[in-house]
Image (cartoon, rainbow, N blue to C red):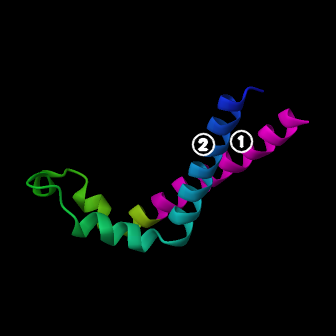
Amino acid sequence: MPATTFWTAVLSTAVYVLTGVVCLVWPEKIQSFGLSHPRLYLHKYNPFLWFMRSRYYIWTLRLIGAAALGAGIELGVTMMRLAR
């Protein structure tokens, strides 16, 4: 495996695992950050603002976290198998 491909795979794995852990461990903080940092005037026209305020948003973040963590683990396992 070329060095560039290897380091790209390592970086991708790290990003997926980090995203998964953050979304699984701190979904409430992500929600409060998203609600407290509006993007200029776009925040009041956001059609998903009702969803971002709901409890379903927390569960969606957890689902995204589980999927990202699973993808990161799968990438890591695949990378280790290819390295042998």
Where residue 39 appears, as percent x and y from the top left, is 17, 55
How crowded pointer 1 is (Cα within 10 Å; few <14, some 14-19, many 20+) is rated as some
| Residue at numbered disc 1 | 75
Residue drawn 79% across and 38% down?
Answer: 78
Where residue 59 appears, as percent x and y from the top left, is 48, 63
* Left or right: residue 60 compared with residue 76: left
Quarter of the rendering containing residue 41:
bottom left
| Residue at numbered disc 2 | 12
Instruction: Please state which of residues 25 and 61 is positioned toward the viewer in this rendering.
Output: 25
Residue drawn 46% across and 68% down?
Answer: 27
The magenta segment is 59-84
Q: Quadrant of the N terminus?
A: top right
Most frequent secondary structure within the magenta stretch? helix
Instruction: Please state which of residues 37 and 60 is positioned toward the viewer in this rendering.
Output: 37
Please tell me which of labels 2 and 1 falls first in the chain. Answer: 2
Residue contact at pointers 2 and 1, CB within 8 angstroms:
yes
| 68 is within the stretch colored magenta | yes
In this view, 46 is above or below 36: above
Where residue 73 appears, as percent x and y from the top left, is 72, 50
Residue type for callout 1 = Leu
Residue drawn 23% across and 59% down?
Answer: 49
Whole-number angstrom distance, CA of label 2 to CA of label 1: 8 Å
How crowded pointer 2 is (Cα within 10 Å; few <14, some 14-19, many 20+) is rated as some
Mark nearer the viewer, 2 or 1: 2
